[in-house]
Image (cartoon, helix red, strand yellow):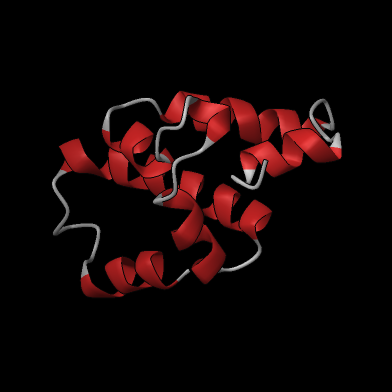
């Protein structure tokens, strides 16, 4: 996870203001979970900026920016639990359906 590692190596905990530590940590956790589903950084980057039917044709990155990351976490949870493991649902999540 190049972005997370770059941030971590350039900043020590003492340099990061307390009010931004939590949002950064939450975003890093989300990126890690999404990367596990996408398979690699390139696929994740493409997925984040592509309109996605699972989210009303909104770009997942815009959902994150607009404070709607909970929608992504819900989909991640469903996929992890196998509730949406049907191939068509996975394709929609990946923006291929």
Viewer-side residue, 21 vs 95: 95
**Coordinates of residue 40 in the picture (x, y in percent):** 59, 68
Which quadrant holds residue 60? top left
**Coordinates of residue 2 in the picture (x, y in percent):** 42, 73
Q: Is residue 50 left or right of residue 74?
A: left
**Coordinates of residue 23 in the picture (x, y in percent):** 30, 38
Q: Does residue 74 lie above or below 32 as drawn?
A: above
Which quadrant holds residue 65? top left
Quarter of the image where the C terminus is located = top right
Q: Is residue 38 left or right of residue 5?
A: right
Viewer-side residue, 59 vs 74: 59
Residue visible at 55% across and 64% down? 43
Viewer-side residue, 92 vs 84: 92
The number of discs equals: 0
**Coordinates of residue 6 in the picture (x, y in percent):** 32, 73
Residue visible at 30% across and 75% down? 9
Q: Does residue 32 lie above or below 63 as drawn?
A: below
Residue visible at 27% across and 29% down? 66
Q: Is residue 36 left or right of residue 5?
A: right
Q: Is residue 4 left or right of residue 70?
A: left
Viewer-side residue, 60 vs 31: 60
Residue visible at 54% across and 54% down? 32
């Amino acid at each position: 996870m190049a972005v997370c590692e770059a941030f971590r190596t350039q900043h020590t905990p003492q340099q990061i203001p307390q009010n931004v530590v939590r949002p950064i940590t939450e975003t890093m956790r989300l990126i890690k979970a999404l990367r596990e589903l996408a398979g690699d950084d390139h696929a994740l980057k493409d997925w984040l900026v592509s309109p996605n039917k699972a989210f009303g044709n909104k770009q997942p990155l815009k959902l994150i920016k607009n404070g709607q990351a909970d929608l992504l976490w819900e989909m991640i949870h469903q996929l992890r639990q196998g509730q949406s493991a049907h191939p068509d649902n996975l394709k929609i999540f990946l923006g291929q359906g």
